[in-house]
Structures are given as structure tokens and as C-alpha cells.
Amino acid sequence: MSRLVDAGQSESDVQEVRLDVWLWAARMFRTRSLAKQAVDGGKVDLNDQRCKPSRQVAIGDRLKVTRGEERLELEVLHLAAVRGPAPVAQGLYRESEASIAAREILKEQRRLEGGGLRLSARPDKRSRRQIRQFKARTEV
């Protein structure tokens, strides 16, 4: 049995799947509710049109998904109503060459910007004393 479809269906039986379910199964979003929020928020276009989470996705459809600064352009290759392992999820879609190139450019820009100042979660006792002393000096 294929992992790309629901347990009671064969792969040939599945013609369409809800957009939010497919995005979740393709691991674009961690939960189906996050996928639904993204679609409702206009972060996902299906065939260059805004749509609702209940819109049906078919093989060959084109998706534009915005996640943070990333903009993915995908073509649906397979349908899935259940979430499977990551290698199976990657086989559900094909990312366009332009999208891959844009992500590489964005990745390089982030690398060149540098991480900035990285603080630990909380200053230790010595650092807290230094901060208090510094603030006391500046208040005078």
C-alpha cells in the first residue's frame, strides 16, 4: 500500500485533496492548523489565485508558498491525505528552478549579514552585577 494516500484508498482513487491537508502532508507546515492560517492569511496561492483552505488540490497544480522570507514555487506531483516520512513528503512536489535560485541568494545574503549579537538565554551572576553597576553609573 502506498504511503501517499489514506489507508482505505489506493493511489489511483485519490483525485483531489484539501489544500491545507496537502500542505501539512508535504511538510510545508508543522500542523494542519498552521497550514490553514497561512492559506487564510494569503501566504499560499493556488494557480496564481488566493484560495480557501478547503480548496481541492490536483496533480499538476502550481502553488506559491510564503514562509517567513522564503517564497517557494511548487508543482504538485502526487497527492497525500496523510503525513508520512520526510523523503515521501519531498516526492509530493517539485520546486521550480527560479525558486531554488532565489532561496540560495537569500541564504547567501543571510550568511553575509552575519548573525549579529548573539546573547545567551540569561546573564550569569557576574554579568548581572556588571549591568547593575553600569546602570547605576548612568543614572547619576
Image: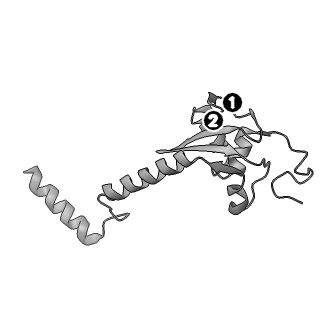
Q: Which mark is residue 130?
A: none
Q: Nearer the viewer, residue 92 or 32?
A: 92
Q: Which mark is residue 39?
A: 2
Q: Residue furthest left?
A: 140
Question: In the drawing, does residue 61 fall left or right of residue 67?
Answer: right
> Residue at coordinates 19% horizontally, 66% vertically from top-left?
130
Mark 2 residue element: helix
Q: Nearer the viewer, residue 75 or 129?
A: 75
* Distance of label 1 from label 2 (alpha carbons): 6 Å
Disc 1 marks a residue whose amino acid type is Lys
Disc 2 marks a residue whose amino acid type is Val
Q: Nearer the viewer, residue 40 or 137?
A: 40
* Residue count near mark 2 (Cα–Cα under 10 Å), binned few <14, some 14–19, many ≥20: many
Marks 1 and 2 in Cβ contact (< 8 Å) = yes
Residue 105 screen position, x and y as percent: 42, 51
> Residue at coordinates 77% horizontally, 42% vertically from top-left?
59
Residue 89 screen position, x and y as percent: 70, 56
Mark 1 residue element: loop
Q: How many marks on residues?
A: 2
Q: Nearer the viewer, residue 32 or 9?
A: 9
Is the N terminus in the top left, top right, bottom left or bottom right quadrant? bottom right
Q: Which mark is residue 52?
A: 1
Question: In the drawing, does residue 42 fall left or right of residue 81?
Answer: left
The first of marks 1 and 2 along the sequence is 2
Q: Tell me if residue 49 comes above or below residue 128 in the rendering.
A: above
* Residue count near mark 1 (Cα–Cα under 10 Å), binned few <14, some 14–19, many ≥20: many
Quarter of the image where one finds residue 123: bottom left
> Residue at coordinates 47% horizontally, 47% vertically from top-left?
102
Residue 60 screen position, x and y as percent: 73, 40
Quarter of the image where one finds residue 39: top right
Residue 93 screen position, x and y as percent: 68, 49
Question: In the drawing, does residue 114 fall left or right of residue 76?
Answer: left
